[in-house]
Image (spheres, rainbow, N blue to C red):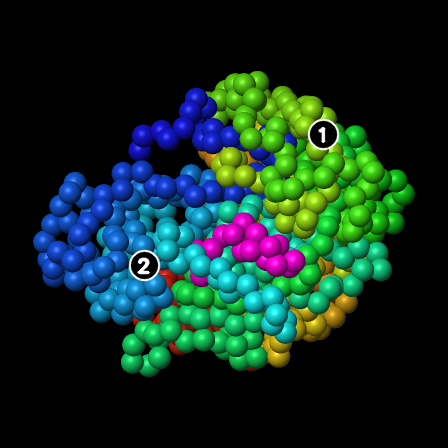
Amino acid sequence: MPKTDDTTTGLSRRGFLTAAGAGALAVGAVGAWTPVYALPLDTGSLGSSGSAGGGATLPAPPNFPSGIDLAQQAYENWSKEIVLDAVWTCSPKTPGDVVRLANWAHANGYTLRPRGAQHGWTPLTVVKGASVDKVILVDTIKHLNGVSVNKGGSPATVTAGPGATLDDITTALQAQGLGWANLPAPGVLTIGGTLAVDAHGAALPGPGQSTAPGHTYGSLSNLVTSLTAVVWNGTEYAEKTYLRSDPQIKPLLTALGRTFITSVTMQAGPNFRMRCQSYTGIDWKEMFGPKGASGKTFESYVAQNGGVEAIWYPFTTKPWLKVWSVAPSKPAESREVTGPYNYTFSDNLPVAVTDLLGKMNSGAPGIAPLFGQTMYATTVAGLAVTNSSDIWGWSKDVQFYIKPTTLRLTEGGGAVITKRENIGQVIHDFTTWFNDRIEFYKAKGQYPLNGPVEIRCCGLDQGADVLVPSAGAPTISAMRPRPDHPEWDTAIWLNVLGVPGTPGMFEFYQEMEQWMRSHYSGNDYTFRPEWSKGWAFGPNPYTNGGIITGALPQSYRDGLPTNDNWDTAHAAYNELDPHHIYSNSFMDQLLP
């Protein structure tokens, strides 16, 4: 594929969130990237056989539904570790088109994979190295992107198509005095993709602050009041609407792409003002002190404010700490912002960092310490120059900070589910283990991880947050509460990033994942994957069969009723899509 931007390092320079960097790196946004070499077809002329023509290299889909735009396009996932030179991609204009597509796919032996913002590391959309001759990607952004707010409802709601972005939805909500308390950092994510992987933010209620009506501190999936999906009705694929009170909706609230949502309605609450303060002068040993430690600890900032995120650049001693708090009035020290994405210094990769990244990516992994130190210095300077260390504005304008200008890194980690008072100990144990292992490899002249550590916390998918009759939490959301541990109320997200292709990186991730699963277990914790990131590490991510078919499903059985767990979700997906038109070879291993 031709380069669509200035590339001198072997990785994208769509801009690198050098400081927002790690946060961006971890939660990254992909933006409205349009694959190159789009070769459109006149679908009305496609018969039961024949050449696609026009330079297309894939067999033409036979009898493809007329009136639905179809083109052969390139595809790449967020980390560029799954890249396809060509795959058929269509753009349905209406939910009715999706129904026609589903029945066509069933009749012709094809699979449909919804395609949103392409912000993902996983093979949930397409599988690296697998044939795409019988695969159609379905672009939801181009047409299925409507947004409508019902401010006067009880509760207030917003209804959106699967391709509507979080930017679009929250902008519409804000115009009506509404918002969401817990948002992912990239606003360019589509709501369809967001719900598929139970996306979340870094928010917890502050001291004495309860969850305001209409909001949740769990996943965005927990805000759904109803949704419509194209499912098998026993005779054909057709649209069906599910209310939150219907037990059948629960597996669909986080479905990993095993269904196709055409519309979703979500509750919202009164909008509010937030403050975000940044700190770059706290030593990591103090910040990540154990439970109850004195000083400027992560735990203490959570207790004082609620939302906290730490970004620890590789081989540096002072992480970038972001602290969010609800602030109805503007603090005198804060700078008011009137829109999102306020770390403007992070939009482009400085030459100094570009040069280091290029060398590191070209076989000089020992540059990793200098790389991390340069990123940290860029952050400190950027915050000062742009006066961004203390900003204040509406909720979305302070929570969205990752633009589609981020270095494409690999990521591993997951969520520790526990009670809020364990935050300090969980983070202390992990950062101590991580630092020891990094220093161990450094002493051997090895640098298997060269990206930042990102640590965030949020709440769980509490039933009390839902303002309509509800059958319960999303079945396989990582933030699903455990009935046998009602004291567990917090998800602690521990993630580490690395440059794709770094020698020894996947082996390190495998070691880290095994330690996490072993350490965070028993009566105090459980460990779950972050669906959109890296997991099941073996020689490569998503290849550890023991986790894919064993430990991972078991984490959605432990402490959960037998009539509402991994197995019932699995059965539901196969009932609603018995022909596996919404699947691929990896999904058939995870959810056969």
Mark 2 nearby-residue class (10 Å; few <14, some 14–19, many ≥20) = many
Q: Which residue is mark 1?
A: 387
Marks 1/2: CA–CA distance: 44 Å
Q: Amino acid at mark 1?
A: Asn
Residue 369 visible? The answer is no
Residue, x 50% and y 57% (percent of image)?
191
> Magenta part of the protein: which range?
161-178
Q: Secondary structure at mark 1?
A: loop
The answer to whether residue 68 is above or below residue 365 is below
* Residue 270 percent location from the top left of the image: 69, 61
Task: Determine which residue is flagged by label 2.
Answer: 92
Q: Is residue 303 left or right of residue 273?
A: right
Residue pictured at 83% horizontal, 52% vertical? 303
Which comes before the other along the chain, label 1 or label 2? 2
Task: Give the position of the N terminus as an image quadrant.
Answer: top left
Q: Quadrant of residue 525?
A: bottom right
Three-letter amino acid code at disc 2?
Pro
Relative depth, front residue between 368 and 231: 231
Horizontal and vertical percent position of residue 298: 78, 44
Q: Pick the residue in front: 591 or 241.
A: 241
Left or right for 246, reference 68: right
Residue 18 place in picture, x, y as percent: 60, 30
Question: Which of 206 and 171 lies nearest the eye of the viewer?
Answer: 171
Residue 175 lies in the magenta-colored region: yes
Residue 17 in magenta stretch: no
* Element under disc 2: loop
Q: Residues within 10 Å of mark 1 (few under 14, many from 20)?
A: some
